[in-house]
Amino acid sequence: MELENLDSDACTAVHDLAARSCVQADTVGGALFRLSGTETGLRALAAGLAQIPSASHVSAEILGVIEAFSASAFSLDFPGGRLDLGRTPLIMGVLNVTPDSFSDGGAFFRKEEAVDRALEMIEQGADIVDVGGESTRPDAEPVSVEEELTRVVPVIAQIAERSHVPVSIDTYKSKVADEALNVGAKIVNDISALRFDAEMASVVAEHAVPVILMHILGTPRDMQHNPAYLDVVAEIVAYLRSALAHAVAEGISWDRTVIDPGIGFGKTVSHNLQIIGRLSEFKSLGRPILIGTSRKSFIGKVLGLEVGERVFGTAATVAASVLAGAHIVRVHDVAEMKQVARMAGVLRAPEQMRQATPDGVGAAES
């Protein structure tokens, strides 16, 4: 867990009591304090800090993080429905209505192909369809609001008319989000966590829809130009904590927020692997976790494979993410990843296997 902006007295108290509580306390870049230990140790540290006036607020923060870690089930209300996130990970199917997507090269740029692909993903088990009209691959150039609207609005309207599965609009532009929500989208997926467009927060609040807050370092045009962190997970957690606070301050319901660490958005291969390996640390924020690893370049670099050959590498990252606590996985290969996520979900909570499998735990092997 990470603590931010502690004064010198609080820092001294944490250091002095941490060792006695068997908690590791490290300073990350001066502004962040990273604590690691068992729940018992952290509770002992909190109890000790509660007795020190200058550090009692730190005690309350530690206890709040412990409480957040224990939360595993959430629900997201949207106009006309609800998504339950908990036992079974949800599948978000990717639909790029762009001519230059890294993953499909514009295969679904025309409206008819895009709608057909959305309905196919829904048939394969997608719980959400994520529609985007601007490529956010590294070095991508932005498109105009008008062009993005032309690409996504007719597609979203058709999907919403033909299916009850919620559509998310993948955009950082408030006007695009507003129009998409007006024609049937139910969720906003913002790679900038409401930072690129000052009006986005008010659009989300006005429509009372869930919003996905993602971490990005820089912009798509420059995010992969030597990204650097002192502690990648600690810094992303701090960024997302600030994004959540901003969203709530702007009138967005806490219960309608989702966090995304932003795999591939201003990260090296090592950063991406660390995020997946330490994904459980994001549970300290107390909100459902979405992760999007599908077909991304770090998989290709690890395995030496082109984008169309990364299904098994993606499956490994999906399984690892679900086991670490991911609630939603954003993927291209819906049918395959639905099975991977479901199996990993059962492994994550084997006591719920009877409800998750048709035959229950007592079925004989053949």
Image (cartoon, grey):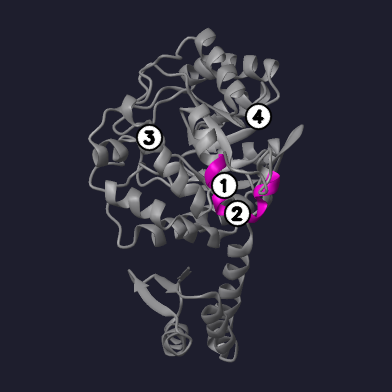
Precedes in sequence: disc 2 or disc 3: 3
Residue 140 sits in quarter: top left
As drawn, 35 above or below 314: below
Look at the magenta stretch and give its main secondary structure.
helix
- Magenta-highlighted residues: 342-355
How many neighbours does mark 2 have within 10 angstroms: few (below 14), some (14-19), or many (20 or more)? few
Q: Which residue in the structure is indicated by mark 3? A: 312
* Coordinates of residue 361 in the picture (x, y in percent): 66, 49
* Coordinates of residue 103 in the picture (x, y in percent): 37, 25
Q: Residue at x 35, y 55 (%)?
A: 274
Q: Which residue in the structure is indicated by mark 1? A: 345
Residue 115 sits in quarter: top right
Q: Which label lies toward us, 1 or 4? A: 1
Precedes in sequence: disc 2 or disc 4: 4
How many neighbours does mark 1 have within 10 angstroms: few (below 14), some (14-19), or many (20 or more)? many
Q: Residue at x 42, y 71 (%)?
A: 34
How far apart marks 4 and 3 lie (CA) works out to 27 Å
Type of amino acid at the residue the image marks with label 2: Ala
